[in-house]
């Protein structure tokens, strides 16, 4: 754990400002987190919702399970150990982009579920279109 000396108030303010600004993920890690966002496997929230000047985001990564865990490979760089849950502080630009990707993935999956709900498999399989009785 990082130690901050409390006798130097200026250093404490600088450290807090760094945390409030958040960090950028590199391209490779951002693409991996974006895939998780599209799947709905992240949780995003503003770092400080009561402060209008703070635009950073808290990012919580959830571990993949099932088929997604078998297909999608996530680097250990996201948390320094085999992929598990982890919290990161993102800057405003990347946090906003991930929120948009998360929203788009949820809308796409909901659209597919509505299509599935309306689909009639029986008639499609037993009465193919174009075939004459």
Image (cartoon, rainbow, N blue to C red):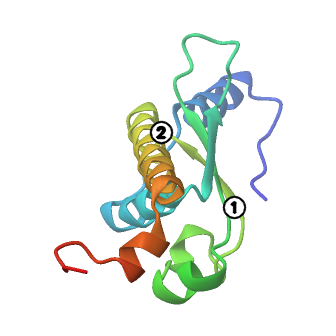
Q: Residue at x 60, y 54 (%)?
A: 42
In the image, which is nearer the foreground, mark 2 or mark 1?
2
Q: Mark 2 and 1 residues: CB-CB less than 8 Å, in contact?
A: no
Q: CA distance from mark 2 to mark 1?
A: 17 Å
Q: Residue at x 62, y 70 (%)?
A: 79
Quadrant where the image shows the C terminus: bottom left
Q: Position of residue 7 (x, y in %)?
A: 82, 29
The one nearer the camera, 80 or 71, is: 71
Front-lying residue, 15 or 76: 76
Q: Residue extending furthest bottom? A: 70
> Is 47 situated above or below 54?
below
Circle 2 sits on which residue?
A: 99
Q: Is residue 18 left or right of residue 82?
A: left
Is disc 1 placed on a helix, strand or loop?
strand
Question: In the image, residue 61 lies at what x, y percent?
Answer: 64, 59
Q: Please state the horizontal and vertical placement of residue 120, each as a whole percent of the image.
A: 46, 64
Q: Residues within 10 Å of mark 2 (few under 14, many from 20)?
A: some
Where disc 2 sits, the SS reads: helix
Looking at the image, is mark 2 or mark 1 earlier in the sequence?
A: 1
Question: Does residue 41 lie above or below 7 as drawn?
Answer: below
The residue wearing badge 1 is 86
From the top left corner, tell me how far across and down residue 37 is, in percent.
50, 54
Total numbered labels placed on residues in the image: 2
Q: Residue at x 60, y 59 (%)?
A: 41
Front residue of 44 and 15: 44
């Amino acid at each position: 754990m990082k130690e901050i000396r409390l006798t130097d108030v200026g250093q404490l303010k600088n450290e807090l400002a760094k945390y409030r600004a958040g960090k950028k993920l590199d391209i490779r890690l951002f693409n991996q987190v974006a895939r998780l966002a599209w799947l709905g496997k992240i949780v995003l929230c503003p770092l400080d919702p009561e402060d209008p000047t703070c635009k950073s985001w808290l990012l919580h990564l959830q571990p993949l399970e099932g088929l997604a865990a078998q297909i999608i490979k996530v680097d250990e760089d996201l948390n320094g150990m085999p992929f598990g849950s982890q919290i990161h502080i993102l800057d405003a630009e990347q946090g906003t982009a991930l929120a948009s990707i998360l929203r788009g993935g949820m809308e796409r999956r909901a659209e597919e579920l509505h299509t599935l709900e309306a689909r009639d498999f029986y008639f499609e399989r037993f009465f193919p279109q174009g075939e004459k009785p």
